[in-house]
Amino acid sequence: MSSDTAEPSQSSDLPIEPPMVDLPIDTHDKGFYDGFSREVSIPGKIIVALIIMWAIFFPVRASNTLELANSSIISNFSGWYVYLVAALIVVCFLLAIIPQSGSLRIGPPGEEPEFSRFSWISMLFGAGIGIGMLTYSTGEPLAHFVSNPDIIRGTVESASVEAVRPAYAWTFLHWGFGAWCTYALVGLAIGYVSHRRGLPLTIRSSLAPLFGKAMSGPAGHVVDVVAVVATILGVAVTMGLGVQQFVTGLYRIGLGEWLLTATEDGGMTASPAAIVTALLILVGASTISALSGVGRGIKWLSNINMALSLALLSIFAFAGSGLYALQLLGFGIWDYIVTLPEHSLTLFTSDGSDAGNILVQWQLDWSVFYWAWWIAFAPFVGMFTARISRGRTIREYMIGVALVPSLMCFLWMVLAGGTAIDLELSGAAEGSILSAGISDQLYATLAVLLQPGVAAVVSGFVVLLLMTYLITSVDSAILIVNTINGAGEDEGGRRYHIVFWGMALSFVVGSMLILGGIDAISVTMIIGALPFSFVVVAMCISIIKAVIYDLVRKHHGVPTTAIGCEEWDGTAAKPL
């Protein structure tokens, strides 16, 4: 019997059995862990607590160990990350364009989506990459404007007009389908079996088409624990970036010198006191929002985020280099599509020359880091997209999760980043934007673009937008972690656990930022992403199998949904 089918029916002459529509997961029925799987909750909390204590009590040893582990994982698994993400793009594309698979619904036939398209897209973007956009919309185009593979090879001059197009080809690579197809595939694997077959909304359920009832036991517990740890570390990177930029913004609008402290290389970074203060404000607000649930706090915050984002983009469009941004968008999308196969499958190897070594390091610092980040972020965003995408077809889901947010990212990059590059090329910035730290480059762009008073007001607006994005991401992550720990249940007595995970996330981000800045969080995330990357491969195979088997069932008139199985009389009928 296949693991994707239920127990054999009395009609043994059927070519295929209905799908498995029950995956029992033991949960505790009293006390602190009432409604939770202790086999998942307790190990997850222990692992995260050990990471926090390690960073706080053994900072030097932790820093040295992280550096060693990072170099080993990056050098040995860089190809694994590159080719895995390329494969995920292909699978998502095929599932969407094949008519039979694209028309399958994530839920019972005819069910209407829970959220409007605007709220749905807003929540996808806010939880997915909203914070990163505010940091990297200027930071990444500028970084590739100064150094990218073409510049390293010597075919293009750094910080020149000719460097702009390759800069955007690589920027779009990192923020396009690679990110969003990773999220889409993980979310589809979870949502398809949860909403269509009635399985618990948790990571292990996505592997039921491959492993069947085995996911109810220890193997399923391990999968969920790995997902919880990856989620906390992935969100920690996003939150770390946001906290740095949040503190820099507060400094920009004049809230005091105490917010920043000098670094060894002569730059400035958030001070320990500022980090602690920011985390108290942001995580406190996030925890309150998480207590109100997805339908209230997160939905409304996401709608506010989208409205504020469009307002900020309008400032760059009309006060900044709007026409130049349109040119960059056209050229950038064309270059991205044309170079996507080559860039997605290229793994730089050193030929022993200085340029070869720099190319390898560039890819490790950028592409491989991003692929690891998206994979670590995938259980959180995937669970969240699965939670809010019930009732949509696979094709609509793929367009909404993979295509629309990619275009939104591209628009951010060309409007904010294009304005920054244009100010540098014209000489108006006089190098002030390029010389600023990545957390400060958006504010530096506004300082050059606008009058001082106006720039201060808009910078305050950015701080507000950043705060709402941070709150949305953190409260979404807390709810998702609790859903995994609660065997797919997202309602009930979760208050103490919501507070615990909010505090845990604060300690992870705070300890790592103070230990070694955003680099320490990034290294920890890359390490945490590796185990989950193997889960992603299994999820990819599992959803392909589930879809193929359901198409075969439809052909033979065998039910494919939990509702259909309840009403089925055990004989072939019209396709369901």
Image (spheres, rainbow, N blue to C red):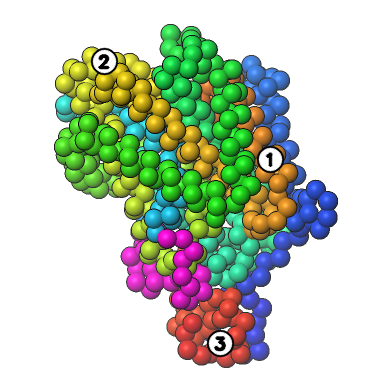
**Residue 14 tag number:** 3
Position of 461 relative to 514 (above/below): below
Q: Which residues are magenta?
A: 92-116
Q: Position of residue 425 (x, y in %)?
A: 18, 22
Position of 430 relative to 568 (above/below): above
Q: Position of residue 439 (x, y in %)?
A: 41, 24
**Mark 2 residue crowding within 10 angstroms, few (<14) / some (14–19) / many (20+):** few
The residue beneath circle 2 is 431
Q: CA distance from mark 1 to mark 2?
A: 44 Å
Circle 1/circle 2 CB separation < 8 Å: no
- Classify mark 3: helix, strand or loop: loop
Residue type, label 2? Gly
Q: Can see residue 158? A: no
Q: Closer to the camera: disc 1 or disc 2?
A: 1
Q: Quadrant of the N terminus?
A: bottom right
Magenta stretch: helix, strand or loop mostly: loop
Q: Can see residue 318? A: yes
The residue beneath circle 1 is 499
**Residue 77 tag number:** none
Say which quarter of the image contains residue 97: bottom left
Say which quarter of the image contains residue 352: top left
Q: Nearer the viewer, residue 238 or 554?
A: 238
Q: Closer to the camera: disc 2 or disc 3?
A: 2
Position of 425 relative to 211 (above/below): above
Residue type, label 1? Val
Say which quarter of the image contains residue 520: top right
At 45% from the left edge and 83% from the top edge, which residue is drawn?
A: 555
